[in-house]
Image (cartoon, rainbow, N blue to C red):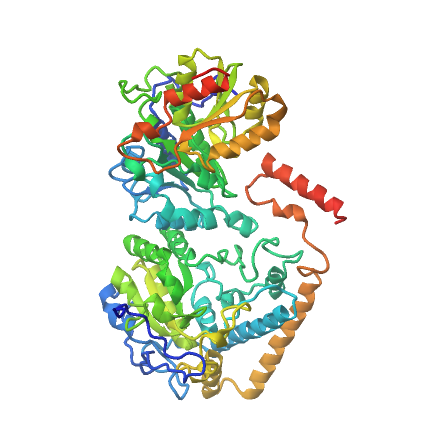
Amino acid sequence: MNCWLSLQSEGSKAVPTMNMVQALNSAMDIMLTRNSDVVVLGEDVGYFGGVFRVTESLQKKHGTHRVLDTPIAEGGIVGAAVGMCANGLRPVVEIQFADYIYPAYDQIVSEVARLRYRSAAAFTAPLTIRTPCGGGIRGGQTHSQSPEAVFAHVSGIKTVMPSNPYDAKGMLIAAIEDDDPVLFFEPKRIYNGPFDGEPDKPAQSWAGHLLAEVPEGYYTVPLGQAAVTREGSAVTIVTYGTMVHVSLAAAAALDLDAEVIDIRSMVPLDVDTIAGSVSKTGRCLIVHEATRFAGFGAELSASIQEHCFWNLEAPITRVTGWDTPYPHAFEWEYFPGKRRVMNALRRLMGEQS
Amino acid sequence: MMSRLHIPVVPARPGEQPDFSYVKIVAAGACPRPPIDVPVLGTVPLAEGLIRVLDDEHRAVGPWEPKLDADTLRRGLRVMILTRTFDDRMQRAQRQGRITFYMRSLGEEAVSAAAAIALRDRDMLFPSYRNQGLFFARGLSLVDLMSQLLSNSRDMCKGRQLPVMYHSAERHIFSISGNLATQFPQAVGWAMAAAIKGETDISAAWLGEGSTAEADFHHALTFAKVYKAPAVLNIVNNQWAISTFQGYAGGEQRSFAARGPGIGIAGLRVDGNDFLAVYAATAWAAERAREGHGATLIEHVTYRAGAHSTSDDPTRYRPRDEFDVWPLGDPVVRLKAHLITLGEWDEACHTALAREVEEEVTAAWQEAVSFGTLNEGFRLDPSLLFEDVFKELPPSLRAQRDELLAELAERGQ
């Protein structure tokens, strides 16, 4: 499914350029307007508008009782949101950094993800947990993590990560409307512009990018559907988040006819799109920023192998962060940048790197 | 070098004389009852005191006397007797291998029974696992509760939950979690939502004193304080968390209720075995919450007279006869004696009620087992294993379900 072939919106006139921050802000603004049950809560999200400005002006527009600044207690924020769900609200929680989500892990794993199951749907938790993830912003080990795999491993919660403003807005609206809980990871390195993995080049903005043309009105991008970001026949790159852009840049640098699949959603996973592509190309590179061991790439690799074994012409390969904490001074040694992806592609294509 | 670490003192271990000298007792009627809008600091003496209504002669005395009519008192007694009778029967059922697990609330029945009667039917309850009295007070069908214990074809949890983890959306009781204290911030969030919507319903939550050490307890109190959430937050201090004495939750010298004013909400320490005191404290806190004056933390001082669960043997860590000398007595005996003192009850009535409840439980059990047990009779459809993980069954789970069904077909099931 090619995401930019299916642009649809309601009530929108001109299509302005938005960065991811503006797109996410627009999604929440629309949902706060459309549905009086929607509330936004988190640390610094109200008056200040969030440390990344994603909730800017939402409190001014929708009031202090619907856009709530909270105490610094992630477990309390998510716990309170579960109770709000039981009382008919539809909370959108911000955890300021994905690195700070662990105090809420018990509420997410034991409560949010299990409530529907354990109560046979008598109680549900239709909340959305937004959280900025990933590195490349000199954040060190406490502001750079990509913990999607530790949540994708948990039954009962959808886990997604957009890679561009158009998807960010449409997927966030879909997440808020979803009756299942959704963990919504936002790759913060690409909030303000795509990033090809080369930190020494001037920062790019989203201006002019096709997927930064974001309708002002309501639209959704369904969860659980991968996007074929670039069609190709030589190799399939399966990736998500910031690494979509790094992968595109690496393939372009090698002038390789790669098919780049942005999975967008880890749970549910669009296995059909991924397997269809790998069966076609016969080669597969998995790219993510998170650590490798038991990372989401391991699930992707196993799943692809199960579906595509007889079509594979080379072993499935992974490019990931190293199995270490995210080191402050060695950020660009850690980050799986263009060079590392290019080298892996060359090996996968049977060339010497 | 000698260790300089302080280790909490446990008053008595098996074979030793029980010692409850550490439990601070205040005479019935001695604690003042402030107006419901008293500033938080005005509750500090109550958080370190002990609100009691029933005196040693079984009379209701003092400013907290809730002036309940005899029918309400008899209703409370019935809920407590039903709780105890149900518990005893289910304990036996577990010993007979009919259910896998059970948790009694012996000795602390008043905590749930009186609170549920003091609250309104629409108030949302977030119980812990030893608050079965809430379900009885709200009139849940015994067959439905037993069916959950049996994981049979009528199981409200469709076979997914350990016994006693009930819920009732219809009767406004949240799903019980086996993870301690998680319900506390949830109850506060529910109350925040009620306030946001401009409604006057309130929430109430319960946890054990041991669970107050969990972060969720502190999150809940902070959120309750910050947003003046209309919630009644209850600590059931039954002295023991499995084998861990309450001193290990920080109960030495200070009350648990004192954490309320410490963080900025009202605190009350209550005789948890005094039905009237629990009722009065709950009613006070509920009115305070409903009128917009914020949450209250209530510590119910009681004693877990039974084992933690059917998997536990308390004779390994505490004296056998502790309950016999527990200074706050037995809540059923005390309310019964009060009703008799009032001339509203007698031994014949009591015997008749006990028999009536016994028969009700027996009849319910016979009906419940007719819907099967975990190992006998009609079984739940194994496909239910995969439902309600998500609202819609995703393709990945559909495939796993089909794989299981094929495997079961091979096994001839």
Is residue B113 at all visible to an observer of this figure? Answer: yes
The total of numbered circles placed on residues is 0
Is residue B197 at all visible to an observer of this figure? Answer: no
**In which quadrant of the rendered image does the N terminus of chain B lie?**
bottom left
B142, above or below A37, in the image: below
What residue is drawn where x is 32% and y is 79%? Answer: B22
Closer to the camera in the image, B37 or A300: A300
- In the shown orientation, is residue B214 left or right of residue A317? left
Among the 4 quarters of the image, the one containing residue B101: bottom right
Closer to the camera in the image, B55 or B94: B94
Q: Which percent across, then down, holds residue B195?
A: 35, 51
Among the 4 quarters of the image, the one containing residue B49: bottom left
A143, above or below B23, in the image: above
Q: Which percent across, then down, holds residue B275?
A: 43, 76
What residue is drawn where x is 47% and y is 83%? Answer: B321
B222, above or below A163, in the image: below
Q: Which percent across, then down, holds residue B265?
A: 28, 61
In this view, the residue farthest toward the right is: B412
- In the shown orientation, is residue A23 left or right of residue A201? right
Q: Which percent across, then down, holds residue B109?
A: 48, 73
- In the shown orientation, is residue B218 left or right of residue B129? left
In this view, the residue farthest toward the top is: A255
- In the shown orientation, is residue B43 left or right of residue B327? left
Closer to the camera in the image, A314 or A214: A314
